[in-house]
Image (tube, grey):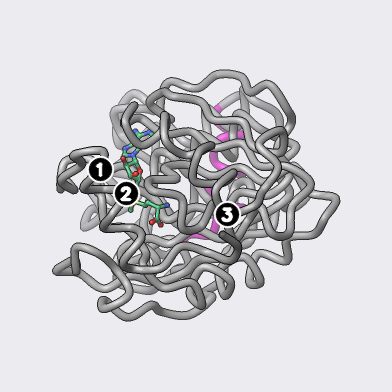
């Protein structure tokens, strides 16, 4: 059998494995081969790439990645799905040696057997942001990729200062990469059909903007600023700085107006505050 997975085969595999998709694991499987090829194309995957997939499920996207990549590493928490993935790939004519399946919670992954270069995933919705941030942090060989997430989350990830949905995910992801929209995806291409819309986010890693101690400090400031996003910066950062007056002084010393809100600041502004705080 060649080609990608179709809707009938996806249901047949799920039935055979006795998999009933659960909300808890965000199991909405893509049943449309064109969408899978579109995602792989948007990620600019090449035959030189080691592609990483988080949550391969029944393998729809995995096969589309195997069509192009040098090899694929797939991390799946559900052992019935992980156990079947290589069989599905082989049945569709792919070389099983090109595929490494890791049965684990992606949130616990510290190392991988091969350095991945591109991340492509239809992310489980309940952990999409932490998973994306974690892999950007832990795997610097990832130069970019495309992730499918809930549209609301996509909007937040690509938001710029001043936007209502700009927040901690937008700034933190921007520490590692430039993120842009790669379009939306209709609900009908999933089984089961989800009750939320989905969109694609493309990211390209940029040059490092600071070392690990500076990142940690910057992220702590970002967390504090957005935990109380209606407050002026000097109030939001008062606990971190030992009082509102000290916060005001420090923010001013960083060249930023302490009466603005966190949602007005760019990543570079948060970095300036972190550097001043470290002095
Ligand atoms: N990639 C497949 C597709 O597009 O059809 C499935 C995507 S489905 C939205 C999310 C997948 O992630 C499911 O297979 C689910 O079992 C898996 N998953 C959920 N939480 C996970 C976690 N913490 N670590 C790894 N995989 C997870």
Image quarter hosting the C terminus: top right
- Quarter-wise, where is residue 63 in the image? bottom right
Q: Which mark is residue 16?
A: 1
Rendered location of residue 43, percent (x, y):
65, 64
Of 108 and 162, which appears nearest the observer? 108
Q: Magenta segment: does it hold 269?
A: yes
Q: CA distance from mark 1 to mark 3?
A: 17 Å
Above or below, 189 against 149 in this view is below
* Mark 3: C-beta under 8 Å from nearest atom of ligand 1: no
Whether residue 279 appears in this view of the structure is no
Quadrant hosting ligand 1: top left
Magenta residues, dominant SS class: helix
Q: CA distance from mark 3 to mark 2?
A: 13 Å
Crowding near the residue tagged with mark 1, few <14, some 14–19, many ≥20 C-alpha atoms within 10 Å: few
Looking at this view, name the residue that lies furthest to the right.
Answer: 48
Element type where label 3 sits in the image = loop
Image point (38%, 26%), residue name: 105
Instruction: List the residue tagged with mark 2.
Output: 13
* Rendered location of residue 10, percent (x, y): 33, 58
The local secondary structure at tag 2 comes to helix
Tag 3 residue? 92
Mark sitting earlier along the chain (1/3): 1
Give the residues drawn in magenta, as a range: 265-277
Q: Residue at x 44, y 69 (%)?
A: 159
- Say which label, 3 or 2, has the lower sequence index: 2
> Seen from this angle, which residue lies furthest front?
1
Please check the rendered image and state whether residue 131 is part of the magenta-colored stretch, yes or no: no
With respect to residue 62, does 149 lie above or below? below
């Amino acid at each position: 059998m060649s080609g990608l997975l179709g809707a009938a085969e996806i249901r047949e595999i799920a039935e055979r494995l006795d998999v009933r998709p659960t909300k808890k694991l965000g199991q909405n499987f893509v049943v449309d081969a064109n969408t899978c090829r579109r995602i792989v194309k948007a990620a600019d995957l090449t035959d030189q790439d080691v592609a990483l997939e988080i949550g391969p499920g029944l393998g729809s996207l995995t096969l589309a990645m195997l069509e192009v990549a040098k090899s694929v590493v797939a991390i799946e928490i559900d052992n019935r799905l992980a156990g079947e993935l290589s069989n599905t790939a082989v049945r569709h004519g792919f070389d099983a040696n090109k595929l490494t399946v890791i049965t684990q919670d992606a949130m616990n992954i510290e190392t991988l057997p091969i350095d991945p270069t591109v991340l492509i995933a239809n992310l489980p919705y309940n952990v999409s942001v932490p998973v994306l941030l974690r892999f950007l942090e832990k795997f610097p060989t990832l130069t970019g990729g495309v992730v499918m997430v809930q549209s609301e989350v996509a909007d937040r990830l690509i938001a710029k200062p001043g936007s209502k949905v700009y927040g901690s995910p937008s700034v933190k992801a921007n520490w590692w990469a430039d993120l842009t929209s790669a379009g939306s995806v209709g609900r009908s291409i999933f089984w089961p059909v989800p009750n939320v819309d989905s969109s694609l986010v493309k990211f390209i890693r940029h040059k490092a903007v600071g070392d690990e101690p500076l990142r940690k400090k910057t992220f702590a400031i970002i967390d504090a600023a957005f935990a109380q996003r209606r407050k002026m910066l000097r109030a939001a950062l008062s606990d971190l700085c030992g009082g509102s007056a000290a916060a005001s002084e420090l923010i001013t010393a960083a060249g930023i107006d302490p009466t603005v809100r966190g949602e007005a600041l760019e990543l570079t502004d948060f970095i300036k505050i972190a550097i001043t705080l470290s002095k």
